[in-house]
Amino acid sequence: MTPPPATVAPTSPAALLWDFDGTLADTEPLWIAAEYDLIGQLGGTWSDEHAHQLVGNSLIDSGSYILHAIDRPDLSPEWVVDQLVSRVIGHLRSGNLPWRPGALALLEAARVAGIPCALVSASYRVQLDAAIDALPPGSFATSVAGDEVERGKPHPEPYERACAELGVDPRSCIVFEDSETGARSGNAAGALVVAIPNRVPIPDAPRRVQVASLTDVDLAGLARLLDEADAHV
């Protein structure tokens, strides 16, 4: 009698690469509140539609957008960013971070399994450090902040840099993103992107999978997704 063929276990991801705002933590409401507060003080008018245009963008690009929207060429994007960051960082340091559903459980599962994680964000280093300090030690092996790269998302540089620091091939990694801008960055780097739309829709694309929540994701499922994506190359 011929024995059944051995089942080959899916290959685990070489690393998990996490966006911060809207993916790991639900910080978008903090940014939107900061935008309304600042723009109101400047005498401008803001809207949720404007705010959603900024999701996933670099902070400098967001600052430029705000100044154009409220017609304040006398101010600099850098000044706007400083104002917004100072408002948001106070909330981050309060210790009451609103983590996205399933995010902390998946981070812990990766730590136990020995799969390195990187935090890759358009947010600045001071913000990422505040978030990392609120997490269990060892949650992230490395992190890349928006003020540490020359070209932010949707350019692949942030994710390419994280993979280089981890010593892994981007095509063997999985990126978690909640915006089209971030998803494009992860895909451009060569990674498989698991898109978890939060406040804005994310179009379908090659090597991109959509899920409703990180509560629907586990390490075994991620390994299967990666194998399936590689099988269709």
Image (spheres, rainbow, N blue to C red):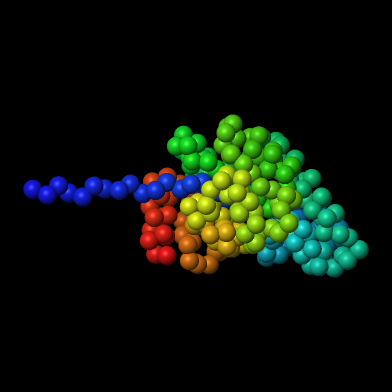
Q: Residue furthest top?
A: 137
State whether residue 21 appears in this view: no
* Horizontal side of residue 54 vs 229, given as left or right: right
**For this rendering, which residue is in front, 45 or 216?**
216
**For this rendering, which residue is in front, 66 or 168?**
168
Residue 232 figure quarter: bottom left
Question: In the picture, which quadrant includes the C terminus?
Answer: bottom left
> With respect to residue 51, does 119 lie above or below?
above
Q: Residue furthest left?
A: 1
State whether residue 121 appears in this view: yes
> With respect to residue 187, does 168 lie above or below?
above
Question: Residue 48: image x %, image y %?
Answer: 68, 62
Task: Report the residue at 63% width, 35% height from top.
Answer: 134
Question: Residue 201: image x %, image y %?
Answer: 55, 64
Question: Residue 9: image x %, image y %?
Answer: 33, 46
Task: Report the residue at 38% width, 58% height from top.
Answer: 228
* Horizontal side of residue 25 vs 111, given as left or right: right
Task: Report the residue at 42% width, 54% height from top.
Answer: 226
> With respect to residue 138, does 98 lie above or below?
below
Question: Residue 199: image x %, image y %?
Answer: 59, 58
Task: Report the residue at 66% width, 47% height from top.
Answer: 144
> With respect to residue 181, does 114 lie above or below?
above
* Horizontal side of residue 129 vs 104, given as left or right: right
Q: Residue furthest right?
A: 74
Residue 96 figure quarter: top right
Total number of numbered discs in the rendering: 0
